[in-house]
Amino acid sequence: MGLWQLGVYGSKHEDAATGARTAEPVDLLAVWGPDAPFAADLTDRPVWVRGEFTGDQFMVRRAADRYWVVAPLRVAGTKSMLLVVRGSTDERLASPDRPRGTVTFRAILQPSEDRSDAVAFDPTTGVYGSVSIPQLANVVRGDLFSGFALTDASGINAGLNPVAPPDPHVSWTVGLRNLAYALQWWVFGLFAGFMWWRMATDVVEVEATRRTEALSDLA
């Protein structure tokens, strides 16, 4: 029963993750403003982004031979910039031109990265180590949203390899009741085993006492 409840707990996590992956996107400015912090519930949130790419795009190293192409986009209706990961490439200089004019596309929101193993900037290659908003705020002209976006929209990728979003984060509290039931069944099982041991021990002790008394009477 405990394993069954644990399986239900896992199934609820999978359902929550599937729901997050297939959620309908909403307008970016309906859930997040340019001056607002990046709240936990924005992570992996699908949104519609509308704006115009402006300023210089740059490269972010993801592995020894893999780079993200990141471009700032001025979000329509604001004066702030949202960093958009257009895609990835294995060639540092392979950066297709950005789309021109106002574009609308689907994106997945991500929090600013804080990679302790990443180099902030490599002057020999002109490549950054992570999409760290505090660091890049000194590079990109204009105010930055406090997170960034991934997109697989073909019009934005322009031949780059789409960057798959990470698996949605699901709180451990989803299905908490089933997890508690699983622990409860195991506690019941341990308690039943303890009570059996205690009762068996008592029976053995009583029988041993009875035999000792019987031997004493014979003596």
Image: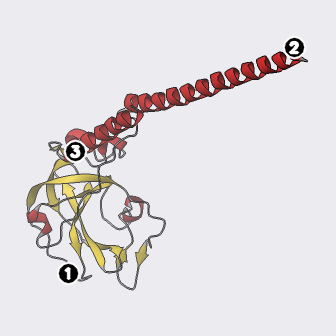
Mark 2 surroundings: few (<14), some (14-19) or many (≥20) residues within 10 A: few
Nearer to us in this view, 173 or 116: 173
Q: Is residue 84 above or below residue 98?
A: above
Mark 3: amino acid = Thr
Nearer to us in this view, 74 or 88: 88
| Disc marking residue 148 | none
The location of residue 117, given as percent across then percent down, is 47, 69
Nearer to us in this view, 14 or 201: 201
Mark 1: amino acid = Ala
Q: Is residue 127 above or below residue 156?
A: below
Q: Which quadrant does the N terminus fall into?
A: top left
Residue sitting at x 37%, y 59%: 133
Residue sitting at x 21%, y 49%: 78
The location of residue 5, given as percent across then percent down, is 36, 33
Side of 218 relative to 143 (left or right): right
Real-space Cα separation, disc 1 to disc 2, in angstroms? 101 Å
Q: Is residue 76 above or below residue 39?
A: below
Q: Is residue 21 visible?
A: yes
| Disc marking residue 94 | 1
Q: Is residue 164 above or below residue 35?
A: below
Residue holding disc 2: 217
The location of residue 110, given as percent across then percent down, is 30, 53
Residue holding disc 3: 18
